[in-house]
Each structure stands twice: as structure tokens, then as C-alpha cells.
Amino acid sequence: MFWEHDKYRTRLEFKFLNKNIVLYVGNDPELIVFGMVNETEDNYFVPFIDYDNILYEKVLKDIKHIQRVFSLSDMVVLCSEEDETANQELYGNYMVTGFDKLTFQEHLDMLRHTRCDRNYIGCPKFYKQKHWVLRFTEKWFVWNGKVQKESVKFKEIIPNKPNYSRECSHAHYLMLRKLFNIPRLNLNWDAQTECELIQYRTGIK
């Protein structure tokens, strides 16, 4: 059995039935972070996908799958935390966004085709606005009694040229380009130039 304690919570780790069990007890302080809403002005939703603790090759496999199934164009991968396994495989926390305009139901269906965080799929049921959010500011967390930060960074573009070209949200592209300096993309842009930003509370993880 192993345990550690900081000013916010206690972490207890032990084995039970040959399984590693980790429990956290305590109150996490709330943080104020900022994010971008995936809803467009004309009531569509651009793809937002959130992954936690996953091999990067699985993220790429998911992206290529939904690009094929839902006729999605180029997609952007962002990373908030990344490391290598003992076999030198990349894994971590990733956020994926696209610019194709989907209906609300299409976005739900698209998420269910991925290995994303299950809680992320159901996010809209907890909020009156009924949309998904992509965090773009730093998030702080405590590990081994030390406060560390988790920054969101641009990783790469996964290109695709579908046979059926959907209209894409220029506003969301302009915002991501401003925030992360992503490369120029030549897609079927709409005429909109504004997207909604949001401030919300979260906890130190």
C-alpha cells in the first residue's frame, strides 16, 4: 500500500484481486479556465473530441475512421500532456478538432465512433447551452506535492479530402490559427468570422 498527501487531497494506492486501485480523497480547488464552444452561429457543431491517457496511434486510427465514415476534411490534433511507454509508444491527453459543420445528432454519433473520454460525450446534458467546449488555456495540477501546469499545444494536422465536401466554419479556424498558429488550410469555408468563447470552472486534477 502507498499513500501521499498534499494540502488538497490524499492519494491512496493498493492492490485488490490483482488489480491496482488508486483512490483520491479531498477537495480540489476550483480553477477558472477559458475555452471555445463548438456551436456555430447557424446552429451547426464542429467536431470536438477529448482523449485522456491513450496511445497516440489509437487517436490517429479514430481520426481516420471518422474522416472516412462522416466525410470529414482536415482535422487538428492538440496535446496537453504526452509521454512514452517503455516500448517508446507515444501516449497522453489529446484534443482533436475539425471544421466541418455537423448537426447535433451527427456530432453525437461521431463521438460514439471514437475512444474518447466517455464523460465528454455526455457533456451537453449538464449544461443548458447544449454544446461541447475545447479548453485552450493552461490547467494547473498537483503531483508529489508540487504544483505543475498543463499547457495545450498544437501537434499536427491530419489531412483528408472527402468526396463530399461539407461547409466548414471559418470562425473556428481563425480562432485556432490565432491561438496555436496552425497552418493555412484550404477548405470549403463559410462566411462567418465569430465563434463563442466561454469561461468555466474546473478542478486541479
Image: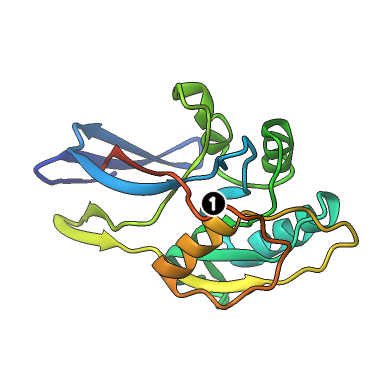
Give the class, few, some or many, for how many residues have Cα within 10 Å of label 1's Cα (few <14, many ≥20).
many
The quarter holding residue 10 reads: top left
Q: Which quadrant of the structure image shows residue 75? A: bottom right
Q: Position of residue 78 (x, y in %)?
A: 50, 64
Q: Nearer the viewer, residue 127 or 121?
A: 127
96 left or right, relative to 190:
left
Residue type beneath disc 1: Tyr
Task: Tell me if 199 is positioned left or right of 40 in this view.
Answer: left
Looking at this view, name the residue that lies furthest to the front: 191
- Pick whichever, 195 or 63, lies toward us: 195
Tell me the SS state at disc 1.
Answer: strand
Q: Is residue 50 above or below residue 151?
A: above
Q: Which residue is mark 1?
A: 51
Residue 93 visible somewhere in the drawing = yes
Residue at 59% across / 59% down in the picture?
170
Count the marks: 1
Q: Position of residue 149 (x, y in %)?
A: 25, 61
- Residue lying at 85% horizontally and 62% vertically, measured from the top left: 162
Q: Nearer the viewer, residue 111 or 92?
A: 111
Q: Is residue 41 above or below residue 126?
A: below
Residue 204 seen in render:
no
Splitting the image into 4 quarters, where does residue 121 fall?
top right
Q: Residue at x 72, y 71 (%)?
A: 159
Residue 14 image point, x, y percent? 35, 41
Q: Nearer the viewer, residue 86 or 186?
A: 186
- Against 43, residue 60 (above or below) is below
